[in-house]
Image (spheres, coloured by chain):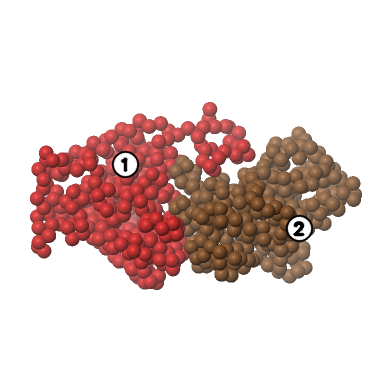
Amino acid sequence: MAVTHTDPATKPSKAQPKATPKKSAAGSALGADLGLSSDDLLEMYRLVALSRAVDERMWVLNRAGRIPFVISGQGHEGAQVGITWALEKGKDWIAPFYRSIATCLTFGMSPRDIMTAQYATASDPSSGGRQMPGHYGSHEHNLVSVSSPVATQLLHAVGLALAAKIRKTGQVALTVMGEGSSNQGDVHEGLNFAAIHKLPFIFVVENNGYAISVPLARQVAGSSVAHRAAGYDIPGVTVDGTDVLACYAAARDAVGRARAGDGPSLIEAKVTRLTAHSSDDQQTKYRSEEELAAEKANDPVPKFRAQLADAGILTDEAEERIKASIVADVDDATDYAESQPDPQPSTAMKWVFAEDWPSEAPPPWGLGE
Amino acid sequence: MALKTFIEAVREGLREEMVRDESVIVLGEDVGKKGGVFLATDGLWTEFGDDRVIDTPLSESQIVGTSIGAAIGGLRPVAEIQFADFIHPAFNQLVSEAARLRYRSNNGYSAPMVVRAPYGGGVHGALYHSQSVEAFYTHVPGLKVVVPSTPYDAKGLLRSSIRDDDPVLFFEHKKMYRSVRGDVPEGEYTVPLGKAQVTHPGTQVTVIAYGLMAHYALEAADRVAEENISVEVVDLRTLRPLDKETVLDSVRKTGKCLIVYEDNRFGGYGAEVAAIIAEEAFDYLDGPVTRIAGPDVPGVPYNHVLEEWFMVNPEKIADGIRKLAAY
Ligand SMILES: Cc1ncc(C[n+]2csc(CCOP(=O)(O)OP(=O)(O)O)c2C)c(N)n1
Ligand SMILES: [Mg+2]
């Protein structure tokens, strides 16, 4: 499947020295047991690092007063790229959540798409500037539009899986949310239905230990979301969400089951939230300095980089090349978003319905013409 | 033409749309083998099978939420909520998701789906099997709300609702299921959404109603006709988008308007209609825009004396007309 993910623009060209992957102790190259080539791994690394760079730029722009709000995916990128890589781009479905920057980039959205959402420009493909940043979505890339009430999207992914099963399209539908959100009733209703009908559905929980300020122990009885899978008689696994390849492996298994008609799976990826909940949150009020410092050791970006470098896959040249492409992409996305016009009130009554209704009238102050 | 009950018309509309378009599926509680608690989907499971007629678990948010997802995935789900009273667990999916999906994605996504629900009192259903819930949803831009009153309209409007590209709430008064009969033509026809109908022409007082109340309004019009009061009855049929034209044309002609709804009065759907008339037909009014609506108690009581007290009926409407005509 992974062929569809390889972006020709960043593929090592013939002129460049090819890395010679070191064999592992077992004698095989890193990722080989998972069917991942070194080009795949480099592209996965690029996506992890690109997501981080886009995210970091968002915070810079927020502090500079250019964008009013940031909600971040920092710490979640490894799990997102690893898991999304197991799906087929342009075929399968994802109903993401507000931290899903790396998920969206892996599934086909561009840094420009992400950045125009931060600026709420007319050209923002997620919502045309109608939604807060973080509410991504793209029909073109099979990413369902994100809303704010948490966990509602689970049922949409289950419905997509139902449609896929009835229409025999072979598609898989995945949804993802945080562990706090997993307490919503819709999660139970959806898992129960998906399991009854053995739908091609995957439920991913990115467990970062907090729901804003409330820690896992006060959110999840027993502290394991994965254990809940047993209640639906579906497989539930916990993976180290900072281990990109472990996440890929878990998702690949789940996709395999889904495509084979064996029903849904639950994957709980243990990740870390490297930033405050959002730019409006002060996390030192409820997390100690020691804890925050210790969390840095669980940063998936340096971990994946070191893993690929140790395996001889990420050479210095490759890293330089990827870094340069990322800087260029993030700069381009920022410049582009900065240049894009705001949506105009003349469009604000559009798309309440498919068609305009004369009785759905604009306010007395008109549409700003 | 054949005389059909209201529920037969609903069932036929569903069936014929399922035959016409294989992306149409039906899902809800007990809609399969049993054919629904009111038998609206009777026979569909036998004809269309497990994939297209789905007995869901008892989980309303799931029924609506998976319908949204299935609609995104290319199906045309027709969900049944067993009683409108039990649609509240799905409120979030309807209001936050179905209604807002197209707008929030700037037309990137939409949820073409229908949610059918039997509503209304006068059937000894008490607080939780009698509710009128339309006002919660007519308040929300992005939802279409349809309340047919005749078998003809039920079938034609259901067809249009299923073919519509936006989410439609389709409320069927359960008292009408078997008590109301009407002509339903053979062959395919549709009734457009967003179009009201003058069901009784008149000159002195406009009565605006929908659902069961559209029938009671006609009965009331007949009663006061004997007293030489000429009533024009407008059956709204679609509550949102509202056919303002037909409403305002009638009120501008008669100069007096009574709005009838079964739901409790305060903040009910008729309040919005009254406000529109006050704003847009003020110069034509010869009396106050008035309402006959259910009492403001938290539900329809069970005891038959209390239920009769609660329910709007033709005589209560006739009284409202007489008072207004006297202006
Ligand atoms: C239904 C609902 N209630 C409350 C909120 C406000 N809120 C937004 S995110 C959040 C915490 C979510 O925590 P978690 O699911 O663990 O995800 P995380 O943010 O940690 O990734 C809350 C309470 C909301 N968006 N929706
Ligand atoms: Mg969390």
Give the CA distance from mark 1 to mark 2: 58 Å
In the rendered structure, the colour chosen for chain A is: red
Q: Quadrant of ligand 1?
A: bottom left
- Relative to B300, is B68 on the left or the right? left
Residue, x 90% and y 49% (percent of image)? Answer: B227
B113 is higher (above) or lower (below) than A200: above
Q: Which mark is residue A369?
A: none
Residue, x 76% and y 58% (percent of image)? Answer: B312
| Element assignment for label 1 | loop
Q: Nearer the viewer, residue B311 or A17?
A: A17
Residue B258 appearing in the image: no
Q: Amino acid at mark 2?
A: Val
Question: Which is closer to the viewer, label 1 or label 2?
Answer: 1
Q: Which residue is mark 2?
A: B312
| Element assignment for label 2 | loop
Q: Position of residue B19 (x, y in %)?
A: 56, 56
> Which chain is brown in the rendering?
B
Q: Which residue is mark 1?
A: A110
**Crowding near the residue tagged with mark 1, few <14, some 14–19, many ≥20 C-alpha atoms within 10 Å:** some
Q: Amino acid at mark 1?
A: Ser
